[in-house]
Amino acid sequence: MSEEKGENSKKKPFKLTKNLIRLALNDGWTQKEIADKCRTQQSVVSAWAKGTKYGNEQQLRPLLEIYGHKLRRNTFKLYWRYEGGRKLFFRVEGKVMLSQYFCDMRRDIRGKLVKKVPLFKLVIHHQGADQFLVVKQHRMTFKNTNQELECSVKDGIWGSEILPPVSLLELIRFVDEYAENTLKEYPSDAATLPFLLRRSLLNHGFSFEGVEEYPAKW
């Protein structure tokens, strides 16, 4: 990603501007103090508080450094797995950018599709700035019968591995390699996963190289 594109991503409208300003106001800040901290005018902060205007990440950085963690608490998922006879639980914050599962196509002796059984899943969280967290999941089974777990809450059937945080470019590289190496037995998923990731990133306002753009003329 070029430096110019990275700067442009910081200037995109921050959709949680109103929530962020409300956190500061409820903590005792005045609109004037917020304006001074963010190097803008009080009238702009008033519009942010009403939700009629958005700030951008660059403007709001001083407040994000103080209250960003409280915004992230509103978006989290709980993961778990068995390991060495113990149950381990993981609370992961950040907006889910992509949640994609990969199925075993179970067929009868005539080759007719009987059912799709999800066996693997990939979940990607954005944790702010240039940091993403990838969760690799596998369908858990009973040790004695090898039968897949079932649960009315679908998140409960997945054993999860939380990978170390990665940057945007590292994320794209990881997903491309995951599609090529891990999904060899799932050719359709292997072919489409890189597209799904890039579409999700673009929909969330991220910029990166390798996409030819055709902007509209207004």
Image (tube, rainbow, N blue to C red):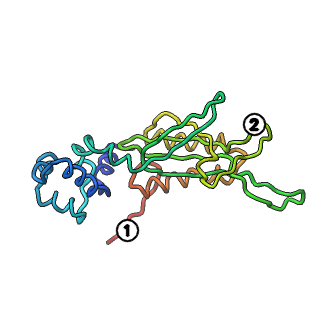
Q: How crowded is mark 1: few (under 14 residues within 10 Å), some or many (20 or more)?
A: few
Residue lying furthest bottom: 218
Judged left or right of residue 96, residue 141 is right
Q: Is mark 1 on a helix, strand or loop?
A: loop
The residue tagged 1 is 216
The label nearer to you, 1 versus 2, is 2
Q: Are marks 1 and 2 in contact (CB under 8 Å)?
A: no
Q: Tag 1: residue type?
A: Ala
The amino acid marked with disc number 2 is Lys
Q: Residue 70 appears at what percent x and percent y? A: 32, 45
Residue drawn at x 64%, y 49% as measured from the top left? 190
Residue at x 58% of width, y 46% of height: 122
The circle on residue 41 is none
Question: Percent x, y for residue 137?
Answer: 61, 42
Determine which quarter of the picture holds residue 112: bottom right
Q: In which quarter of the image is residue 106?
A: bottom right
Q: State the quadrant of the N terminus.
A: top left
Position of residue 118 measured from the top left corner of the image (x, y, whole percent): 68, 51
Residue, disc 2: 143
Q: Earlier in the sequence, mark 1 or mark 2?
A: 2
Residue 73, position as x, y percentages in the image: 38, 46
